[in-house]
Image (cartoon, grey):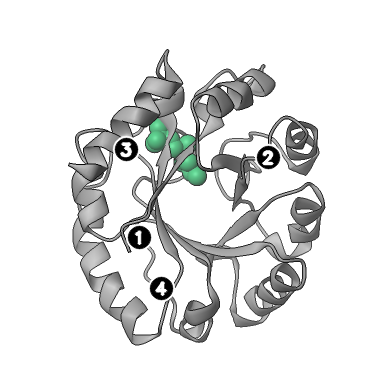
Amino acid sequence: DSQFMIAPSIIAGDMTNLENEIKRCVSGRADYIHLDVMDGRFVPTKTFDHNKIKELRSLTVIPFDSHLMINEPVKHVKDYIDAGSDIITVHAEVTDESSFGEIHDLLKQNQVGVGFAINPDTELPEWSYKFLSSLDQLIVMSVVPGKSGQKYIEETHTKMTRLNSVLKEHNFSGYIEADGGVSLENIGSVFADGARVFVGGGAIIGQQDVRTAIRDFRTEILK
Ligand code: DX5
Ligand code: ZN
């Protein structure tokens, strides 16, 4: 499958005017809008929560890709469904078979895409294998989560090779989303690794002209 999606991360922009960052994504023709929710506990930083997402929701029909970097996501996932997320991703480090099962079922019932994320130092836990065939998205973090503008961790390339065989074995049919340090320099190889959704913080929202930055990402992938 050579279909791919560009997902600008708005926290790389003006945090005091996220409405305007959404507008920049719309005029830039983003495929998804990546919303980095940070609670100041799972990661040291705090960004925004479901209330902000709800406010932003009326500005566009572009799918909202909510990336929950929060503790105990099972307690909060309903709020993010109600806020209008189209895909919700929770982290492996703060879920287990039982809580993820609960999250998975709730998302499916509400027709919200199910996402699972792993940090650079995290391998896919064995308990997650049985969910792989019904996941819509797997976020492979290529930076330590917490802020935008960090450098892509090169070991992610070899990790992707290992992951691809596990994913194939367990009939994963969702999209791999590459998150962290994706740039024009590495997007070609990240695509070759199997990623199909590309988050762009610094490399897209950090640019003056979002439309050109997104177009350059697409052109580089299609090379
Ligand atoms: C990292 C976030 C990323 C980040 C992306 O904690 O999950 O989505 O904002 O920003 P860049 O592309 O600048 O690394
Ligand atoms: Zn993210």
| Residue 24 sits above or below residue 184 on the image | above
Q: Residues within 10 Å of mark 4 (few under 14, many from 20)?
A: some
Q: In the image shown, does 74 or 1 lie closer to the viewer?
A: 1
| Residue 173 sits above or below residue 181 on the image | below
Examine the image and state in which quarter residue 46 appears.
top right
Report which residue position mark 1 lands on: 121
Q: Earlier in the sequence, mark 2 or mark 4?
A: 2
Mark 2 vs mark 4: in front: 2
Q: Earlier in the sequence, mark 2 or mark 3?
A: 2
Q: Which mark is residue 9?
A: none
Give the residue drawn at x 79%, y 47%: 83
Report which residue position mark 2 lands on: 61
Image location of residue 32, percent across then percent down: 54, 43
Question: What is the quadrant of the N terminus in the image?
Answer: bottom left
Q: Is mark 3 within 8 Å of ligand 1?
A: no
Q: Amino acid at mark 1?
A: Asp
Mark 1 vs mark 2: in front: 2
Q: In the image shown, does 194 or 148 lie closer to the viewer?
A: 194
Q: How far is disc 2 from disc 3 in space, using C-alphas?
A: 21 Å
Q: How far is disc 1 from disc 3 in space, using C-alphas?
A: 29 Å
Mark 1 vs mark 3: in front: 3
| Residue 10 sits above or below residue 77 on the image | above
Q: Earlier in the sequence, mark 1 or mark 3?
A: 1
Q: Earlier in the sequence, mark 3 or mark 4?
A: 4
Q: Amino acid at mark 3?
A: Arg
Q: Which mark is residue 124?
A: 4
Give the residue drawn at x 80%, y 53%: 79
For mark 3, give the secondary structure: helix
Report which residue position mark 3 lands on: 218
Examine the image and state in which quarter residue 168 appears.
bottom left
Mark 1 vs mark 4: in front: 4
